Image (tube, helix red, strand yellow):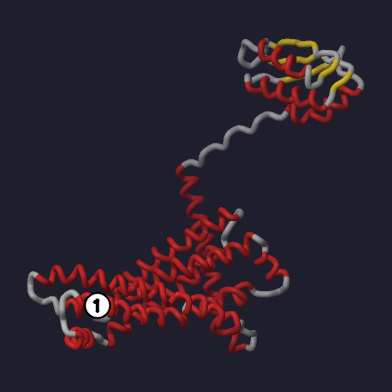
Amino acid sequence: MSEIRLKCPDTLNAESGPALLEEVKGGLPEEGQNVVLDFSRTRSMDSMGSAWLMRLAEAVRGRGGELRWEHASGDVVAFLDLVKPGLLTRPTPPERAPGFFEATGGSAINMVTELREFWNLVIDTIYWTVLAPFEGRGFRWGLFIDEMHEMGVRAVQIVCLMNFLLGLIVAMLLSKQAEAYGIQIFVADVVMIGFARELGAVMTATVVSARTGAAIAAEIATMQVQEEIDALRGMGLNVTQFLVSPKLLAMLVVLPCLVALGIVCGVLGGAVWGIFVLDFEPSVWFNETLQRCELRDIVEGMTKTIVFAVMIVLVGCHNGLRVTGGSRGVGLMTTRAVVMDIFFMIIIDIQFATLFYYVLE
């Protein structure tokens, strides 16, 4: 491999460094040329000179060559020994993109690992929520009350409003279709059945997951990033007992109550359209509604509510505990928790629909 030799100036500093760099760049016409610097006449060298020397080494490496030096003496040797790692370090090659099988295997391993972590969280939560209090191991009743207020009382307004508007929209759309057949009174039946079986539970759980599920994930993720979770473990406190169990029990209490309110508000929203727009007498509309209010429909809606409550809390806590990075990681895990909540909500709803309409029918 060819090389060029250059003599360094008497003093290598901020003034002579740029000139040396330009001389080297101008003398590299060929790809892969090495550069040998002769320090025989160089008597002094400062930090700025060494910085320019490192830029020179980078320029040589960029053309595929290597930088060497000879005949250094005195303080120059000490400076060269100090910056030698930077002069000889080669740039790290770009990372190779994983192949199809590597990517697939990595995804599978990550999925299995996450499922194992989630399963451990489920087992821990069942123990600290159901069994531990009866063994005298304690339960945070004060936090349980606070969580009930935060998850339930403060969510009443938005849950009632959303279900009321949904009931109004459903009645509005159905009445136009029923008008052609003169059966607009049956809109009351459909609104009652729809909210009792599906809409009340699903709409309320969606609002709660976007509000409370995101808050749970963000709270625990922030504690994880700020090492508060590690501090709790260091103090001998169980994280599941301290954080997860009170949230789960509170959600199991408040979500059925919110769903019941949601069903009532959805039916009232449909009644507003039926009474004030379709011009039915209130007694006629509500009598038709109550005739279609069956216990089986209410039980179906409330049963899936219990599963929704468990899912919202566990998914939020699971994503919060898995956070990595800083504030960006908190945001990503919060978004992931809400997306997973809605996805699993649909899957759970499909399972219940299959159970009630094709298995237990």
> Is 175 or 360 nearer to us in this picture?
175
Q: How crowded is mark 1: few (under 14 residues within 10 Å), some or many (20 or more)?
A: many
Q: Can residue 223 be seen in this view?
A: yes
> Is 349 or 182 nearer to us in this picture?
182
Judged left or right of residue 301, residue 90 is right
Number of numbered discs: 1
Judged left or right of residue 301, residue 274 is left
Residue that numbered label 1 is attached to = 272
Q: What residue is at 62 percent from the left and 10 percent from the top? A: 29
The picture places residue 203, in percent across and down from the top left corner, at 35, 71
In the rendered view, would you say 39 is above or below 294? above
Q: Is residue 197 visible?
A: no
Judged left or right of residue 127, residue 73 is right
Q: What residue is at 48 percent from the left and 52 percent from the top? A: 107
The picture places residue 96, in percent across and down from the top left corner, at 54, 37
In the rendered view, would you say 319 is above or below 349? above
Q: Quadrant of residue 351?
A: bottom left
Q: Quadrant of residue 343?
A: bottom left
> Is 2 or 175 nearer to us in this picture?
175
Quarter containing the N terminus? top right
In the rendered view, would you say 193 is above or below 334? below
Task: Name the secondary structure under disc 1.
Answer: helix
The picture places residue 253, in percent across and down from the top left corner, at 47, 83
Q: What residue is at 27 percent from the left and 73 percent from the top? A: 167
Q: Residue type at mark 1?
A: Val
Q: Quadrant of residue 169?
A: bottom left
The picture places residue 271, in percent across and down from the top left corner, at 24, 79
In the rendered view, would you say 3 is above or below 197? above
Quarter containing the C terminus? bottom left
> Is 34 or 207 nearer to us in this picture?
207
Residue at far left of view: 181
